[in-house]
Image (cartoon, coloured by chain):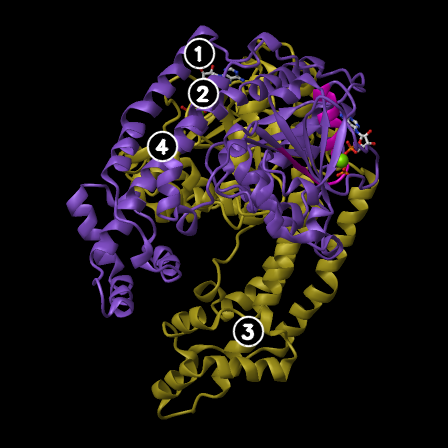
Chain colours: A purple, B yellow
Amino acid sequence: GIMEIPSAKKETFDPIVEGLKKIYKEKIRPLEEMFKFDGFHSPLLNDSDIEAKPMVLLLGQYSTGKTSFVKYLLGRDFPGAHIGPEPTTDRFMAIMHGKEERRTPGNALSVETDKPFRGLSKFGTMFLQRFESSESPAPLLEHLTFIDTPGVLSGEKQRIARGYDFISVIEWFAEKADMILLLFDAYKLDISDEFKRTIEALRGNDDKIRVVLNKADQINTQQLMRVYGALMWALGKVVRTPEVMRVYIGSFWNEPYRIQENAKLFQAEQQDLLRDLQALPRLAAVRKCNEMVKRAKMCRIHAFIIAHLRKQMPSVFGQKSAQAELIKNLEQEFSRIQIATQMPAGDFPDAERFRERLALHDLKKFPKLDKKMLEVLDQVLQQDLPLLLRRYAQIADESPQGVLP
Amino acid sequence: GIMEIPSAKKETFDPIVEGLKKIYKEKIRPLEEMFKFDGFHSPLLNDSDIEAKPMVLLLGQYSTGKTSFVKYLLGRDFPGAHIGPEPTTDRFMAIMHGKEERRTPGNALSVETDKPFRGLSKFGTMFLQRFESSESPAPLLEHLTFIDTPGVLSGEKQRIARGYDFISVIEWFAEKADMILLLFDAYKLDISDEFKRTIEALRGNDDKIRVVLNKADQINTQQLMRVYGALMWALGKVVRTPEVMRVYIGSFWNEPYRIQENAKLFQAEQQDLLRDLQALPRLAAVRKCNEMVKRAKMCRIHAFIIAHLRKQMPSVFGQKSAQAELIKNLEQEFSRIQIATQMPAGDFPDAERFRERLALHDLKKFPKLDKKMLEVLDQVLQQDLPLLLRRYAQIADESPQGVLP
Ligand SMILES: Nc1ncnc2c1ncn2[C@@H]1O[C@H](COP(=O)(O)OP(=O)(O)OP(=O)(O)O)[C@@H](O)[C@H]1O
Ligand SMILES: Nc1ncnc2c1ncn2[C@@H]1O[C@H](COP(=O)(O)OP(=O)(O)OP(=O)(O)O)[C@@H](O)[C@H]1O
Ligand SMILES: [Mg+2]
Ligand SMILES: [Mg+2]
């Protein structure tokens, strides 16, 4: 493969992932289960969610070279890869590591507990029939998972032909992804309204977006400047962030450049892209730590809220109306907890949403707050996670460029 | 000069300008005077307004190379040109043709009837003291006038230090200009809020805007791509039009390129810019014809409106209240004229504005509509101007590229 990550370093960030799994399973999840965290905030995590490799989501109109791009990075074909001039890739494909070549259909994938795709079942059978994994022993896949997608079509075709909600599926993957690559064809630049809508659906994940201006060797320098300028002009209008989006300009397949004028530029750009991809495992480890910190904090606040509300409940009569009253005055109860515990208001969940969820639960059925478990959680926040982050900094120090060759 | 326009062709579009002057003076202006067109719509025109050479307005933050750019195009220094690293140009400068080198201060310029700058007096003495003309016998100036401007400063400096309304002055020139060139320094790209506001003031004239990414030879290709991308990204957000703005990338002065990597690109871009500048006289002639058509149409409608309103006035008593009543029901009167004359409603002036202006006039003092003069105006619209445009097409046909060498 063009992008070898030396296997000696391949496990570099595994101790952190292992640490996170242990901390979560032993010290956070029990509290989450007790106070039904998943009924209020987000699903409980499994090992596979924490282990999941950094994910690179590929998006683009059809024939921009998404599938060829993955093949180029892997340095090999992968099972189920179809490359061609017409709209070819007709499904979402998770390109993952496996000892043997194997394809697994979406219906099976969505129930495998060791894969991070269980959340996809909500998009229905029509979608799962258009989703599969492609496993192969490409070394790069030990560190990254790619999500190849069907090219965005224009107009009605997009909505009618698919039979599932393409935009919502993209949103799901964008949320999980560590990098979102938008591919454009320099030779035939086209930013359809549908693709604009797809980009808009990425809002909130803008910091993950990078752009590939592919097939840039097919045109001369002046044409390339016009195309690249038009691309940036249009992107500036669609993406709301003031920070300029990084665009990698080049030709990402294994053929010689057609026009040589900018060979040096393309090579430098390809190097930059590889370096940024190689940095993902390191960045993902930090991100996972930070997310775990956030989750532990939210779990702590959640436990306090539930315990506080539960305490107000009468022991025998009028429980229903008491709970209704508490739900009604939720903002006020939140304020009281904030004052009592000195936890910042900004960390609290949205009261309106919490109110809706709470209506589905019986406060009386929650246990009392276990002091011991709370101490354990405080320890997670004050010691365990900071220690893990420090450990990470050590690893990063020893190999300053992370997994770079 | 780098941009010679052969003098044999220099008079190419003069017959059209001469024709326009004659038509206006003999057939349109008399009617305008009679019905006080200038009190309702726009000032009466002099020969100099119609003769005025295509104007190129240069804008940019300080030190982006505006003054050097003009010097480069003229192939020579011009009187009053100051070039340097600090904010140097401290005034608006109209760089025009003259047999002798000469500078004329703004106060004098603003009263010269053979120059198109009389409208500038409204910006006050503080501005006129910061405005001058620089005449010299550079051949290019026989065809184009350049307006060099002080660099846009950032923040408070811009507003406080100047003593006149910079943005309004820019708007005035933008309205008159045939091309507006925004200069950026590739080596030190910076788009201050003040400059954004300046660009926003150009709204309505967006089709005239072109961009020069200057000093592009000071950085390597990858850096240039980042800078150019950032520029387009930012411009896309500021300029509302969907059409991508044309950017000329190069180094517009008479020094050799510092970094040679993109010499070929820069040369091609410089050629394109020169070609587009050379096309201005031709485009300006067409524009003048089209504007005269619009003006004649507006004059016709104006005469009909005034004559129609005048006819409703009582001959002796209650004139004041009758006029007030007419002003009040102006929309209704407009509709009646539209029905009677079959003139499209879209061509009519804004009723609210017209109402304000009308309040300053005494309807009874206007003359009756002279049938003869109206016939002459119809002739202008049906014969004279179409003939002139056909004549233009002939000239353009004989020399398909207009004044191109
Ligand atoms: N860098 C490149 N330069 C020129 N042509 C390319 C390049 N990469 C791919 N192609 C060609 O473009 C066409 C489309 O490629 P590919 O199937 O990889 O695109 P895709 O984005 O995956 O399309 P789809 O959305 O239909 O799946 C193919 O003919 C391929 O050979
Ligand atoms: N193409 C170029 N490449 C590199 N340097 C240049 C170029 N053009 C001009 N310069 C230098 O940049 C500086 C500013 O030039 P100049 O005075 O022409 O800019 P300006 O935009 O007119 O500035 P101001 O707004 O202050 O009048 C000068 O030192 C000049 O020599
Ligand atoms: Mg594909
Ligand atoms: Mg200057």
In the rendered image, residue A196, in percent from the top left (x then y), is placed at 62, 46
How far separated are the C-alphas under marks 1 and 3?
A: 85 Å
User: Tag 2, which secondary structure?
Assistant: helix
Q: Nearer the viewer, mark 1 or mark 3?
A: 1
Looking at the image, which is closer to me, A117 or B151? Answer: A117
Left or right? Give the position of B170 relative to B263: left
The disc labelled 4 sits on which kind of residue?
Answer: Lys
Subunit of label 2: A
Q: Are marks 4 and 1 on the same chain?
A: yes
Q: Are marks 2 and 4 on the same chain?
A: yes
Subunit of label 3: B
- Tag 4: Cα neighbours inside 10 Å, few (<14), some, or many (≥20)? many
Q: Nearer the viewer, mark 3 or mark 4?
A: 4
**Residue B354 higher or lower than B386, as above or below:** below
Residue A16 image label: 2
In which quadrant of the rendered view does residue B276 lie? top right
Q: Is mark 3 within 8 Å of ligand 4?
A: no
Q: Nearer the viewer, mark 4 or mark 1?
A: 4
Residue where numbered disc 4 is placed: A27
In the rendered image, residue A334, in percent from the top left (x then y), is placed at 24, 52
Looking at the image, which is closer to me, B33 or B244? Answer: B244
Q: Are marks 2 and 1 on the same chain?
A: yes
Residue where numbered disc 3 is placed: B303
User: Do the CB atoms of the residues marked 2 and 1 lie less than 8 Å apart?
Assistant: yes
Residue where numbered disc 1 is placed: A395
Question: Is residue A64 inside the magenta stretch?
Answer: yes
Mark 4 or 1 closer to N-term? 4
- Tag 1: Cα neighbours inside 10 Å, few (<14), some, or many (≥20)? some
